[in-house]
Structures are given as structure tokens and as C-alpha cells.
């Protein structure tokens, strides 16, 4: 959102795949690169210094963290205690920015915490944003409603950072086998969908899958029908109000390569910038209708 100072309506910061852990460097899952776990925190500190420092001409209205805030390795080396410690370290850095911080959910969030745990953590949007009712098909969350825990209505939401603009934060792991309890119907439906296409014993492997089917792997996720209906409504209302929309989520909204597990991309009449990750080495995707 860089622009000449006199025309800049607002700016925001974007950061993704921090994947912090208080652990020595080691190769990633596919052995294709090294993960510099501790240095990740130094890079975040550098970004925070920029956003909050005098060198930043247009202070961000908000910062969006696009998922995988800490690495799943935390849980492997120290369990939930290590995961919570690592999350606190990173969240403490974000709090120094001095503006609103938004967190999208990635697979590494769910390697560390259950969906219910995230709902009541610092990664939850809380109850301050415009969203919709809890999807009761997910028993991980609906089970919390009967307890004393204050449950946010949903993990996806929208807000307006500036008159004429609408930001939408998606939960692209709404439908997935990770995060949900095995007793949850969303988990069971997601597993059935995965196994119907991915015949590998290890569902994180895309061996034998071709083209768009390569997205049917366990580390991926998608949006359920409730979220899609909600998103269509948000986009329609924004269009009626002549608002420009910016969408954020961990996954690309495309049916190509390793992206959302469900083919649920839909056409809009206006161009919508989408900030997403999970294909870090790919070039920006441009819709043919642009
Ligand atoms: Zn669930």
C-alpha cells in the first residue's frame, strides 16, 4: 500500500511464516531448505522496529500476520508448554507495534494447538469484529459455548480500516483434518474427502496425485459452506456500498497446485487483492478476468 504521502489513505503491514521456535536450525519437512528458528524472531523485531519507528512515513493502521506464527517443532520438542512459551514471545513483539494486529490461521498453528485452544488464545480475533454465528457442525467450538469460556462468534471476520475499504480475514483451515478433534464431524468429513482422492498412507504426501488434485494433502485446508455463504454476503454488501475489498488468508483462493482443499473459488465482478501464502516460491497469481 505504498503511495505518495498526500494520496495515502491508509497503510498496513504484512508478515507471514514467522515459524519461531527456541530451537537450533534444522531442515524443513521436505529437506529443501533450512529453518532458522531463532533468527525468525530477529526478523520480526526488525519489522516491528520499522512499523513503529520514525523511518515509516505512513504508520500502519493494522498489521496482518498471515499464518504459521510459530513452528510445529515447538510441540515436538516440548509439548504444549513449549508451544505456549513460543507464542507468548512472538505475541509480545507484536504488541510493540502499537496498532491492531490480525492473525490468520495456518497449519503450524494447529500443529501446536487445538482449534478450541486457539479460540481462547491471543490468536483469536475476540468478539470485536463483524462476523457470523458459530458453525455448530464443529463440535470443537460449539462444545465451548456451554462452558464459561467466552467464545468469539467465528474464526473469520471483516472490518473497515478506512472509509470505502473492507478487509476480510478468512479461516482457510475451517475444513481440515488438522485442528479439529477426531470426534468432530468436520474432521471426519475432511478425512473422508482426503482419502477419496489421496491414496497415500501418509496424507501429507501428494505422490501419485496430478494437477489440481495435488492440493488434497493433510497440511492443507479449505472453507466450509457456512464460511463461503458468509463471504458471498460480505462481498455483495461491500459491492453495494462501493467498498474496495482486500482478502487475507493462509491459502490462495485458486484451484491450482497446492492450495485450498476444496474448489471454492468464485468470480467477482471487481478485482479483489488477496494476500495469502503456502506456495512461498510461486509467483503472484493473477485471475484471468483481471
Ligand atoms: Zn471441530
Image: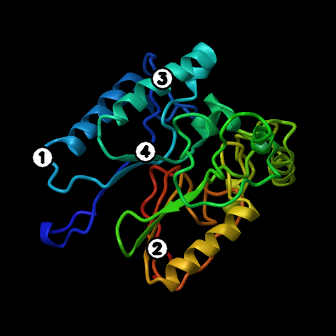
Alpha carbons under labels 1 and 2: distance apart: 29 Å
Residue under circle 2?
A: 272
Residue 201 lies left or right of residue 4; in this view the side is right
The mark nearer the N terminus, 2 or 3, is 3
- Check disc 4 and report its element: helix, strand or loop: loop
Residue located 47% across and 83% down the image: 241
**Could you say where residue 86 lies in the image, as x and y percent from the top left?**
48, 23
Residue 212 appears in view? yes
- Check disc 1 and report its element: helix, strand or loop: loop
Residue under circle 3?
A: 86
The mark nearer the N terminus, 4 or 1, is 4
Q: Quadrant of the N terminus?
A: bottom left
Q: Is mark 2 within 8 Å of ligand 1?
A: no
Residue under circle 4?
A: 16
Alpha carbons under labels 4 and 1: distance apart: 22 Å
Q: Residues within 10 Å of mark 1 (few under 14, many from 20)?
A: few
The mark nearer the N terminus, 1 or 3, is 1
Residue 55 tag number: 1
Residue 266 lies left or right of residue 138; in this view the side is left
Alpha carbons under labels 4 and 3: distance apart: 16 Å
* Nearer to us in this view, 89 or 289: 89
Residue located 74% across and 42% down the image: 141
**Could you say where residue 231 lies in the image, as x and y percent from the top left?**
62, 69
Amino acid at each position: 500500500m505504498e503511495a505518495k504521502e498526500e494520496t495515502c489513505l491508509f497503510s498496513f503491514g504484512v508478515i507471514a511464516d514467522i515459524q519461531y521456535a527456541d530451537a537450533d536450525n534444522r531442515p524443513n519437512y521436505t529437506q529443501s531448505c533450512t529453518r532458522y528458528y531463532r533468527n525468525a524472531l530477529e526478523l520480526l523485531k526488525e519489522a516491528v522496529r520499522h512499523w513503529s519507528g520514525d523511518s515509516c512515513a505512513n504508520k500502519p493502521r493494522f498489521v496482518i500476520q498471515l499464518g504459521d506464527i510459530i513452528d510445529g517443532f515447538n510441540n515436538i520438542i516440548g509439548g504444549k508448554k513449549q508451544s505456549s512459551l513460543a507464542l507468548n514471545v512472538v505475541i509480545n513483539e507484536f504488541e510493540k507495534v502499537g496498532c491492531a494486529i490480525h492473525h490468520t490461521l495456518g497449519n503450524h498453528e494447529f500443529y501446536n494447538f487445538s482449534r478450541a485452544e486457539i479460540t481462547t488464545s491471543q490468536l483469536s480475533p475476540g468478539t470485536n469484529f463483524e462476523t457470523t454465528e458459530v458453525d455448530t457442525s464443529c463440535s470443537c467450538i460449539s462444545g465451548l459455548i456451554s462452558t464459561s469460556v467466552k467464545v468469539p462468534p467465528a474464526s473469520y471476520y471483516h472490518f473497515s480500516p478506512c472509509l470505502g475499504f473492507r478487509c476480510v480475514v478468512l479461516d482457510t483451515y475451517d475444513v481440515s483434518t488438522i485442528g479439529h478433534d477426531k470426534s468432530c464431524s468436520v474432521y471426519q468429513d475432511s478425512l473422508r474427502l482426503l482419502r477419496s482422492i489421496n491414496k497415500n498412507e501418509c496424507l501429507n504426501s501428494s505422490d501419485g496425485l496430478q494437477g489440481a488434485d495435488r492440493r488434497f494433502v493433510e497440511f492443507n485446508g479449505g472453507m466450509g459452506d457456512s464460511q463461503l455463504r458468509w463471504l458471498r454476503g460480505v462481498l455483495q454488501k461491500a459491492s453495494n456500498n462501493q467498498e474496495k475489498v482486500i482478502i487475507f488468508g493462509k491459502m490462495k483462493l485458486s484451484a491450482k497446485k497446492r492450495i485450498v482443499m476444496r474448489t471454492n473459488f468464485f468470480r467477482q465482478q471487481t478485482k479483489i487483492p488477496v494476500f495469502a501464502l503456502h506456495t512461498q516460491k510461486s509467483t503472484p497469481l493473477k485471475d484471468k478476468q483481471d
